[in-house]
Amino acid sequence: MVIVAMIAQHFEATIKDHLKMKLRKIQRRCASEMHVNVTIDCCYRVKKIVKEKMVGNHKEEFGLLWDYAHELRSKMPGSTIKMVV
């Protein structure tokens, strides 16, 4: 039995490169590459998991910007740092 997390891991790079990939295409690729028949609902959950991982990465990287700004302030106290949010 193939679970959604396995399919998401298998197609993560493909879906990231082609965010507008249709659910039917994901379904067909599962059938051809993994030899598994999945429902459209399963494909929807796969796409949702991949998108959530991408958003999480952006949030983590955005948090690192503030750490970087604090580090610059501590190393170069006289400098001006502007961040537009």
Image (cartoon, rainbow, N blue to C red):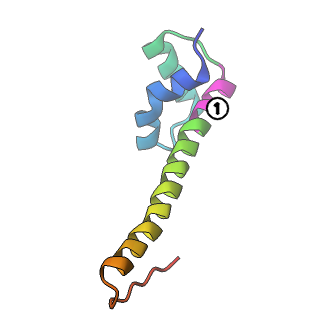
Label 1, secondary structure: give it.
helix
Q: Position of residue 35 (x, y in %)?
A: 49, 9
Viewport quadrant of the N terminus: top right
Q: Position of residue 10 (x, y in %)?
A: 45, 25
Instruction: Determine which residue is flagged by label 1.
Output: 45
Identify which residue, 61 or 37, lies in the foreground.
61
Q: Is residue 36 above or below residue 15?
A: above
- Whether 43 is among the magenta residues is yes
For the point 44% across and 67% down, the residue is 67
Identify which residue, 76 or 9, lies in the foreground.
76
Q: Is residue 32 above or below residue 85?
A: above
Q: Using the rendered view, name the quadrant where residue 78 is placed.
A: bottom left
For the point 61% across and 17% down, the residue is 38
For the point 45% across and 80% down, the residue is 83
What is the three-letter code of the residue carrying label 1?
Arg
Label count reads 1
Q: Residue furthest left?
A: 76
Q: Position of residue 24 (x, y in %)?
A: 57, 27
Identify which residue, 55 or 39, lies in the foreground.
55
Label 1 Cα crowd, 10 Å radius (few <14 / some 14-19 / many 20+): some
Identify which residue, 80 or 51, lies in the foreground.
80
Q: Is residue 72 above or below residue 38?
A: below
Q: Main secondary structure of the magenta part?
A: helix
For the point 43% across and 15% down, the residue is 33
State the extent of the magenta-drawn residues as a range: 39-47
Q: Position of residue 41 (x, y in %)?
A: 69, 27
